[in-house]
Amino acid sequence: MEYRGPAIVCASRAQGETAVIARLLTAERGLLSAYIAGGRGRQLRPVLLPGNLVEAEIRSRSESQLPFGRLELRESRGPWLSEPLPAAGIAWVTALTAAALPERQPFPALFQALSALLTAICVAPSARGWIIPMLSYEVLVLRELGYGVAATRPVEGDWTGIFAAFDRIGRELSRYPLAERRADVMATRAILRERWARIAGA
């Protein structure tokens, strides 16, 4: 297996003393896991932040072997990870993507949607500018995986409708694609909801 192109960092976990195993979303190959040598070092640690857009080179000698990867930073989300709401939004959408999608199955629509959503989180003047796109991304994840969800698009500023849709979609996520990993992944979503509630007064 060989891939070279853009990828979004969705998750990483320590492997050995200095390496990490990263989970990266690509448009052509879907979600890929790769061994990144030195990923916990000073140079690569900022590259492996969730939400970062990277140029990835991923290779393996066989389909059964964990690929080795090399990454170059193209766009960093680091500056927004110190802000509570953007940080919670980035943490949730990347955790959802890493946990819900099967590996090596392309979802080009999800790659484009996640790229746009991450940009919206970082450039919108406030969280009000990306709440509804976040809900749309969650619905798209469900539909791309074959789960229908009856969710009416709420009106911007209608916090009652927004939270009703948020909770309804959350039940579908925990019931289907996140059923086996509900506790840890959905906890990230609960943090996001709590922070949204503060600005909405809900």
Image (tube, rainbow, N blue to C red):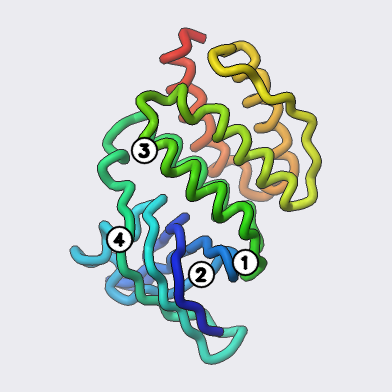
Q: Distance between the residues labelled 2 and 4?
A: 15 Å
Q: What residue is shown at x 74% (from left), y 40% (from top)?
A: 175
The answer to whether residue 38 is left or right of residue 61 is left
Q: What residue type is labelled 4?
A: Val
Earlier in the chain: of badge 4 and badge 1, it is: 4
Q: What residue type is labelled 2?
A: Ser
Name above or below for residue 19 compared with residue 136.
below
Earlier in the chain: of badge 2 and badge 3, it is: 2
Q: How far apart are marks 2 and 3 (CA)?
A: 25 Å
Earlier in the chain: of badge 3 and badge 1, it is: 1
Q: How crowded is mark 3: few (under 14 residues within 10 Å), some or many (20 or more)?
A: many
Measured as percent of width and height from the top left, residue 161 is found at 65, 15
Q: Which amino acid does label 1 sit on?
A: Glu
Q: How crowded is mark 1: few (under 14 residues within 10 Å), some or many (20 or more)?
A: some
Which element carries disc 2, helix, strand or loop?
A: strand
Question: Which residue carries the number 1 mark?
Answer: 103
Q: Distance between the residues labelled 3 and 1?
A: 27 Å
Q: What residue is shown at x 61% (from left), y 84% (from top)?
A: 64
Question: Which residue carries the number 2 mark?
Answer: 33
Earlier in the chain: of badge 1 and badge 2, it is: 2
Which element carries disc 3, helix, strand or loop?
A: helix
Measured as percent of width and height from the top left, residue 96 is found at 56, 46
Earlier in the chain: of badge 4 and badge 3, it is: 4
Which element carries disc 1, helix, strand or loop?
A: loop
Question: Which residue carries the number 4 mark?
Answer: 47
Q: What residue type is labelled 3?
A: Cys
Q: What residue is shown at x 52% (from left), y 48% (from top)?
A: 114
